[in-house]
Amino acid sequence: MNRKPLVLVVMDGVGLTDKDNGNAVKHAYTPNLDALMATCPNTKIKAHGTAVGLPSDADMGNSEVGHNALGCGQIYSQGAKLVNESIETGAIYTSDTWKELIANAKGHTLHFLGLLSDGNVHSHIKHLEAMIREAKKEGVERVRLHVLLDGRDVPETSALIYVEEIENLLAELSDSTFDAKIASGGGRMVITMDRYEANWNMVEKGWHIHVLGEGRQFASTKEAIETYRNELHCSDQDLPGFVIAENGQPLGTIEDGDSVILFNFRGDRAIEISKAFEMANFDAFDRVRFPKVVYAGMLQYDGDLHIPEKFLVTPPHITNTLSEYLVKKGIRSYAISETQKFGHVTYFWNGNRSEKFDEKLETWVEIPSDVVPFEQRPWMKGAEISDELIKAIESGDYDFYRVNYPNGDMVGHTGNYEATIIGMETVDLCLKRLMDACDKAGAIMIVTADHGNADEMEEKKKNPEDKAKPKTSHTLNPVPFIIRGADIELKDGDFGLSNVAATAVELMGLEVPEGWNESMLAKK
Ligand code: 3PG
Ligand code: CO
């Protein structure tokens, strides 16, 4: 058959709501997106909660679960849910990995490293609490925490709430047999939690803070947070690293013989630090000292590369993905984004696999991201991504194209409303260029998003007279789903991101594989 090319655009972090205040999606000047919504078949689809495999509908969407659902056409129970279940049933404590971590930590120290919040995107404080209680029960005597401050999946200055909660627990559990303290920490966008190798320097800084105990010293985590806030006036995610010390001595460096648990369940920002703990030959930075520890992740973050080797909960085994299906049909596909979201359209898209199914049929292009706070460059690499993608569309070398524009999300996470407006307007300009390229190539376009963010840039006020606080996290709102350039109609129904893959293959003239959620196209 004479198949039309299909171009699928993910506008990261672009949700839809009628709410007016702080709605950068609504208030940006986006004539092209507006025209698409006014003239093309479109609907709103769910991108949060149970529709993407999260524990409940109170859970906002995120890029991992969003791209997983887009890329596999199914709903899998995700890390957040699987860890809850494993802790509830106690299965986690019967795993060989847990037993090894505990046995090894006796006479040494058990370290927990991870994002300290209840954001439920990368981690949940309740998981940490449950494991600390169990460690004490099983006879571990010394526990040290290395806490990454969030402010990105939760309100931007909420770190002290979580610090207080965890310190209360440590105080409750501490006695002559159990010594548990926070040893180090810092903002998640400054240390340790880099992703897709955008900035290894963050991980190096984290290594110095957590492992070597080198960094600015404070007597308590509260003191560190309050001091940095007074000095820098920044949100929690941007607070520098700190080391907790007594008489100049760090409270918990990581030493030979210790056990280390990375309690984040999401992989993108957990892979680099895991490599630093595991790899004998490691050249991303000079580790200075490489302690021999038993290291485990909450989940395995990369199933192809087996990172980390040891993990506590088995990740969702996502199979029968769109990429796999297209490769079987001999369809040539092309994926592009900039570094910050490159793994989203490749690794997350393919069910947390870092490798291609077929080198010949799949092309992946990464445009290097700027290494700056994105409120300073809200246009990000929109123009460069579009240049490359348009060249690829013009080449006619591919049948299926997918692209992620990060602006709504990455600029949205800064909490800066004006910059997010510019981010949205950038995406809109890019859409126009793509529309023209699709017209020339006779291509169909799908425009959608993975979850909301830019659509709510103000926290809900407690009292109407309060000053609005910037909101940095994702939202619960649905996202647009638009089809341009195809003579189709959409069915009525309650659809979500997991219905996109089936819709895409139908637009390519293929049958929907068994096990996928249904297509949104109405039968003619
Ligand atoms: C991040 O890692 O930047 C946020 O926690 C989640 O954002 P993402 O899901 O859009 O990547
Ligand atoms: Co985001």
Image: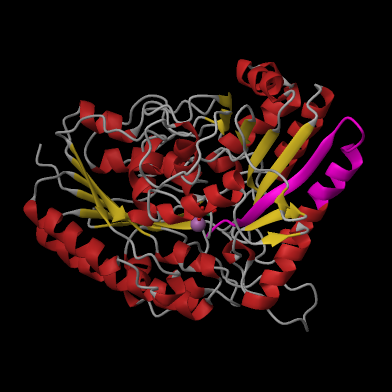
Q: Position of residue 57 (x, y in %)?
A: 65, 46
Camera sees residue 386: yes
Q: Is residue 84 left or right of residue 4?
A: right
Q: Is residue 117 left or right of residue 506?
A: right
Q: Position of residue 520 (x, y in %)?
A: 39, 44
Q: Is residue 183 magenta?
A: yes
Q: Position of residue 422 (x, y in %)?
A: 40, 77
Q: Which of the 4 image quarters holds residue 510?
A: top left
Magenta region, residue range: 165-189
Q: Is residue 350 left or right of residue 136?
A: left
Which of the pair 487/425 is nearer the observer? 425
Q: Is residue 493 above or below residue 179?
A: below
Q: Is residue 245 above or below residue 383?
A: above
Q: Which of the 4 image quarters holds residue 106?
A: top right
Q: Position of residue 208 (x, y in %)?
A: 54, 50
Q: Is residue 344 left or right of residue 236?
A: left
The quarter in which the N terminus is drawn is top left
Residue at (37%, 28%) from the top-left corner?
304
Camera sees residue 524: no
